Amino acid sequence: MRTLKFLLQKEFRQIFRDPSILRVILIMPVIQLLILPWAADYEMKNIKLAVVDQDHSDYSRQLINKITSSGYFILTDYTDSYNASLKQIERDKADLVLQIPDNFEKELVKEDEATLFMALNAINGVKANLGGAYLRTIIQDFNREVRTEWIQFPRFSPETQIEVVSSNWFNPLMNYKYFMVPGILVILLTMVGLNLAAINIVKEKEIGTIEQINVTPIKKYHFILGKLIPFWILGLVVLTIGLTISRLFYGIIPAGSFVTIYVFAAVYLLAVLGLGLLLSTFSSNQQQSMLLSFFLMMIFILLGGLYTSIDSMPEWAKWITRFNPVSYFIEVMRMVVLKGSNLADIKYHLFSMLGFAAVFNTWAVISYRKRS
Amino acid sequence: MHSVIVENIIKTYGKKKEVAALSAISFEIPKGELFGLIGPDGAGKTTLFRILTTLLLADSGNARVDGFDVVKEYKSIRKRVGYMPGKFSLYPDLTVEENLNFFATIFNTSISENYDLIKDIYIQIEPFKKRRAGKLSGGMKQKLALSCALIHRPSVLFLDEPTTGVDAVSRKEFWEMLKGLKQQGITILVSTPYMDEAGLCDKVALLQNGKILSIHTPQGIVDDFSDPLWAVKSTGMLHLLNDLLALEAVKDAYPFGEFHHVVLKNESGKKELEQFVQSRAKDHAVMQAVKPDIEDCFISLMKN
């Protein structure tokens, strides 16, 4: 115990004597948490729309008015030549082209039926998809308005109509920040933990102190614990700062209890730090371990369910996410923050994470060799 | 009682074991001896140190340190040896005092307990005890490293090139310190690429390409040198060296201070050399007999 106490004392001294690292650990996550959620927005706005109006009728103008007043679209071009509009897409001046053909109004009135043409710039897939969907909804809406204007209502509607009204549970206003902020916090916490742990033992290898440590009778698990505990505490500090920011700046008050979050985070940090130490024992210099943790981080983020839903991934990718600790924590965070889940609800996640922690740390202790 | 026993240690590197770092090394160091391991860079000195300090496993062979086997009883060895790696390897962001305290603690002892052993060394750096180790000068770093290696009162001390990159005065001081430690009964194995330091050891092993060329006391090594040795100098030293090497009677010639040392094949070669020197009288050529020192012995051992 005395040895461990001194190891911890030494590690803390080293951490606090490196102000640049401390700054990165504490200030960078704060800044990122203040900036990123504002940019990481699912809603598409400012979609550039080019309209090819070959009808120049009352209805076509009404339709365009309706589209632009929705707030999602910016009318960047208004012509009567489809080719000219296509040029706008090519020059990236437009994301969407809506063609209103000749006789649009006439056919709508006379034949009860008219066609519109939509061309999407699919280079940015998300924008094209969402933009197309928005536009389609607006046009349908417009269609209904026109009908009500023209059709004289009988006593009973001649056609059956199903109207769908949805209500968003757990996040009634669909405020995306409620689920993005906890997710981003998880990513930041993982990055801090993984990178710190990954470079730590390697740093001792680089400056050669590990040689000196290895010839002492110090125990392997003492050494690993001495590395683990300081970063574990630091990780919980970062989490606390993050939760405070979510509350102060985004007004996010978890529906569940903080105890649940902290219990899970404590186990989660053990797993992440264990993984970092493992990388550290495998690498022989800081570049190697930084690159390794960087690539792992990439996979963790993209297959973590922060930006894309895990449920819509292919089967093999879903399997990978099961080995991704980040995906568990993101899910738990959202469950606790939005739904108010308690420890019993997240017990599957908690036990999985305990498994991760046990495997990574045991592996790290075993693969840290005092002799080669 | 031997403090260090090395028997047929072999260590190779590379996937196909193509690089032989140590080929069947054997030697013994009696307790309390200051044993020098002299050899050029890449001779295998550090590899041998790492095997003896239980940081590296040999391919084959046995080694015992203070009576314990380096493979089976490595835990006991780690408790009783002090190791000072060639590269400064203390925490640069901890102060002098914190470093010493840290190493004392992980050996389950304290500075005050063994202060008498390190006193002479530590007293020189004590005025800087609040300074971070990374900010010390080279000589002071080395004194701190030695203090840290000694803080748990080891019975065997391994010093891997402790004087490399240290100025001449500090080197001299350092060897004085080693003599003091020897008097405390500590066995010291020290490696160095500097041949002039060999004379300061009790016994010296010359290591080259993983083989021991000779183990002897410094005096014994000098006595083994039987060939006649002369020193020659003139103007135009470079030409002189080439001309000397071309002589029939000359076994070897090499620059040595302001002279060239010339090793003759036998006593009768003296005549040829005298004639040669006379023929170069206009270049102020002179020759004089010299006693071989340890460096001459090593040069001749290495070249054969």
Image: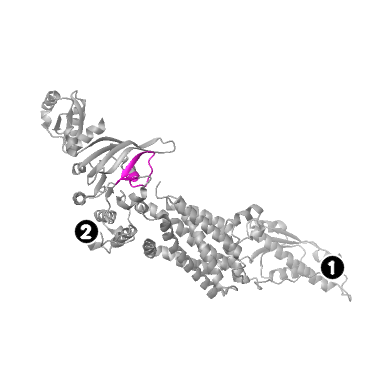
Above or below, A47 against A365 in this view is: below
Q: Quadrant of residue A322?
A: bottom right
Between B94 and B152, the one nearer to me in the picture: B152
Dots 2 and 1 on the same chain: no
* Residue A259 place in picture, x, y as percent: 54, 71
Q: Nearer the viewer, mark 2 or mark 1?
A: 2
Residues drawn in magenta: B48-69
Q: Quadrant of the N terminus of chain B?
A: top left
Q: Which mark is residue B116?
A: 2
Between A30 and A98, the one nearer to me in the picture: A30
Q: Which element is circle 1 on?
A: helix
Q: Quadrant of the C terminus of chain B?
A: top left
- Check if residue A43 falls in the magenta segment: no
* Residue B55 place in picture, x, y as percent: 37, 47
Residue A77 relative to residue B13: left or right: right
Between A342 and A35, the one nearer to me in the picture: A342
Identified by mark 2, the residue type is: Asp
Residue B100 relative to residue A64: left or right: left
Label 2 is found on which chain of the structure? Answer: B
Identified by mark 1, the residue type is: Val
* Residue B238 place in picture, x, y as percent: 20, 33
Above or below, B227 against A262 in this view is: above
Would residue B194 be visible to someone looking at this image? yes
Visual colour scheme? one colour
- Check if residue B64 falls in the magenta segment: yes
Q: Give the residue at mark 1.
A: A109
* Residue B107 place in picture, x, y as percent: 32, 57
Q: Quadrant of residue A175?
A: bottom right
Label 1 is found on which chain of the structure? Answer: A
